[in-house]
Image (cartoon, rainbow, N blue to C red):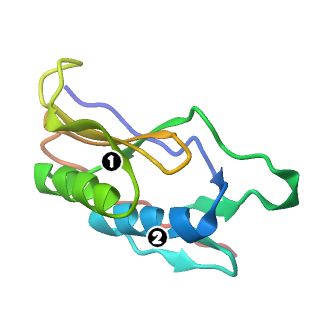
Amino acid sequence: MSYTVGRLIDHLDIRVSDPAVSLPFYRAIFTALGHQVEALEDAINCDEVYVTASGNTGRVTRDLHLCFQAATRAQVAAFHAAGLAHGGRDNGAPGLRDYHPGYYAAFLLDPDGNNLEAKVDERITDRTAPAITLTTA
């Protein structure tokens, strides 16, 4: 069995109520998943997922479920541990789930209560590329 994964989302902005608490949390979980984090003025960016202050609008991202890909069970565990160490709350310890065979995941609630997941799909035995790099003219 094989399937193709494309890029549907160009970018995502998670607006947080307290950047002093949330930015270190997100930096820790993204780093645990093996990604580089770009520091911005009062925000961070990781692969076009921006974590920003709600600003004067007061609009905070709430009730979001977002799943991040992990390469290994160890990365899933590192994501969970890093999130707990930086203000996240446990919403499901690392382990196999019954969604389908080889679905290994962990869940955290971020400081604003969003449900974040890291999962490795152990059915995937080979990727054609670890990522896609786009260049502009």
Residue 69's disc number: 1
In 3D space, how far apart are the residues under numbered discs 2 and 1 (Cα atoms)?
A: 20 Å
Instruction: Please name the residue shown 34% across and 69% down the image.
Output: 31
Secondary structure beneath label 2: helix
Which of 45/8 is in front? 45
Three-letter code for the amino acid on which mark 1 is drawn: Gln
Locate residue 21 relative to residue 16 in the image: left or right.
Answer: left
Residue 62 against residue 88 in the figure, above or below: above
Residue 27, how many percent across, how many down? 44, 69
The quarter of the picture where the N terminus appears is top left
> Where does label 2 land, which residue?
24
Residue 65 seen from this side: yes
In which quadrant of the rendered view does residue 107 lie? top left
Three-letter code for the amino acid on which mark 2 is drawn: Pro
Residue 106, how many percent across, how many down? 25, 40
Residue 58 against residue 27 in the figure, above or below: above
Mark 2 closeness class: few <14, some 14–19, many ≥20 residues within 10 Å: some
Locate residue 48 relative to residue 94 in the image: left or right.
Answer: right
Locate residue 38 relative to residue 76 in the image: left or right.
Answer: right
